[in-house]
Image (spheres, rainbow, N blue to C red):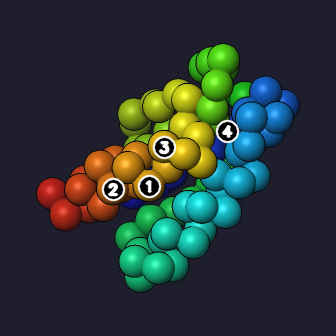
């Protein structure tokens, strides 16, 4: 699984650095280092009013925040890895 986090100026201002750290922590906590590649990307062109844009494999998500991160990770990372 490849997870790309937008670090463009808009997402940076909306907390992309924090989102990167949350992903790093959850990946390590769940021993997923061999299953997940975490990368940054410059502007994904999907800017929204709140949150950060994230791409998982070929699917893009907008509006990710620290408050919605745990549920997002559960359904869009853990669940998809189990289904593979």
Numbered badge on residue 68: 3
Q: Is residue 13 visible?
A: yes
Q: Residue at x 75, y 52 (%)?
A: 17
Residue situated furthest left in the rendering: 83
- Residue occupied by mark 2: 74
**Front: mark 4 or 3:** 3
Q: Residues within 10 Å of mark 3 (few under 14, many from 20)?
A: few
Q: Is residue 18 left or right of residue 4?
A: right
| C-alpha separation, residue under disc 2 versus residue under disc 1 | 6 Å
Q: To which quarter of the image does residue 5 belong?
A: top right
Res. 45 visible in picture: no
Residue at image point 64% right, 52% down: 19
Q: Position of residue 45 (x, y in %)?
A: 66, 19
Q: Which residue is mark 4?
A: 6
Q: Which residue is mark 1?
A: 70
Q: Are marks 2 and 1 in contact (CB under 8 Å)?
A: yes
Q: Position of residue 75 (x, y in %)?
A: 29, 49
Circle 4 packing at 10 Å, graded few (<14), some (14-19), many (20+), is many
Where disc 4 sits, the SS reads strand
Q: Tags 2 and 3 in contact by the CB under 8 Å rule?
A: no
Q: Earlier in the sequence, mark 2 or mark 3?
A: 3
Q: Earlier in the sequence, mark 4 or mark 2?
A: 4
Marks 2 and 3, how far apart in space?
Answer: 10 Å
């Amino acid at each position: 699984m490849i997870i790309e986090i937008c670090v463009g100026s808009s997402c940076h201002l909306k907390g992309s650095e924090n989102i990167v750290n949350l992903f790093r922590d959850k990946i390590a906590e769940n021993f997923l280092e061999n299953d997940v590649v975490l990368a940054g990307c410059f502007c994904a062109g999907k800017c929204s009013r709140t949150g950060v844009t994230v791409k998982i494999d070929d699917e893009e998500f907008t509006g990710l925040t620290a408050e919605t991160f745990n549920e997002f990770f559960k359904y869009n990372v853990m669940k998809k890895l189990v289904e593979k």
